[in-house]
Amino acid sequence: MNNNLFFGLILLSFNYNCAEVNSQDIAQNTTAVDSVYVGQTHFSDDVVREDPLYTAIVRVDKQSNKEHLLSIQMNLKNNSYFVSPTEPGSFTGKFTIVLTEPQQLQTNGAIMETPLSKVDENEGFAKLVRDNTHYKQSLKVLSKENFEVYGYIQFTIEPRCSLEKIPFILSYVDGKLSVKMDGC
């Protein structure tokens, strides 16, 4: 009985290993994915702002000695949306990052948006953010001294039509840049 089972498993493994796989068929059944939403993840040193229409998570990561990355995760709720920072038109409530002390810390390059927002033809052909989106802004430290720079994220959240400001402080102490909540 054991010999028959053993020979049967060997025969089955030969058939399995010799099966022909048509890679072209497999490739035709795949689809391109722009990005994958993993869910909210934040650490104890992140600034988190909860609202019924969104959750904003702000953090800073070191890239090199003087380069840092300001990372903002915008998780939208209840069919809310806002105007993308990549929208070329002039909108009062466009998503914006503002820093108050450009002589100590400044943005370096354009803000990166993932996934990219799309033009919404139903809302006047503007680029609207309707999905959970991650923003990255490169920051350059210009001072060797310890400092604090005040900043905020500003945007109009729809459909509530309210101008939102998320204040934060970027603190540079002994070569380490960190973010903390400003105000309540």
Image (cartoon, grey):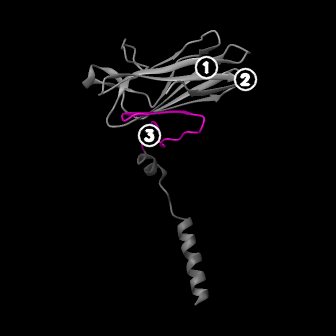
Residue of label 2: 65
For image coordinates 49% across by 57% down, the residue present is 21
Is residue 183 covered in magenta? no
Write down the quadrant of residue 53 in the picture: top left
Of residues 54 and 65, the one nearer the viewer is 54
Residue of label 1: 139
Residue of label 3: 32
Q: Position of residue 38 (x, y in %)?
A: 49, 43
Of residues 60 and 172, the one nearer the viewer is 172
Say which of marks 1 and 3 sits in front.
Answer: 1
Kind of residue sitting beneath label 1: Leu
For image coordinates 50% across by 20% down, the residue present is 152
Is 71 left or right of 90, judged from the image as shown? Answer: right
Is 179 left or right of 122, judged from the image as shown? Answer: right
Q: What stretch is highlighted in magenta?
A: 31-55
For image coordinates 33% across by 32% down, the residue present is 80
For image coordinates 71% across by 23% down, the residue present is 173
Say which element carries label 1. Answer: strand
Q: Do the residues labelled 1 and 3 touch (CB within 8 Å)?
A: no
Q: Position of residue 32 (x, y in %)?
A: 44, 40
How far is the residue under mark 3 from the one under mark 2? 36 Å
Write down the quadrant of residue 77 in the picture: top left
Say which element carries label 2. Answer: loop
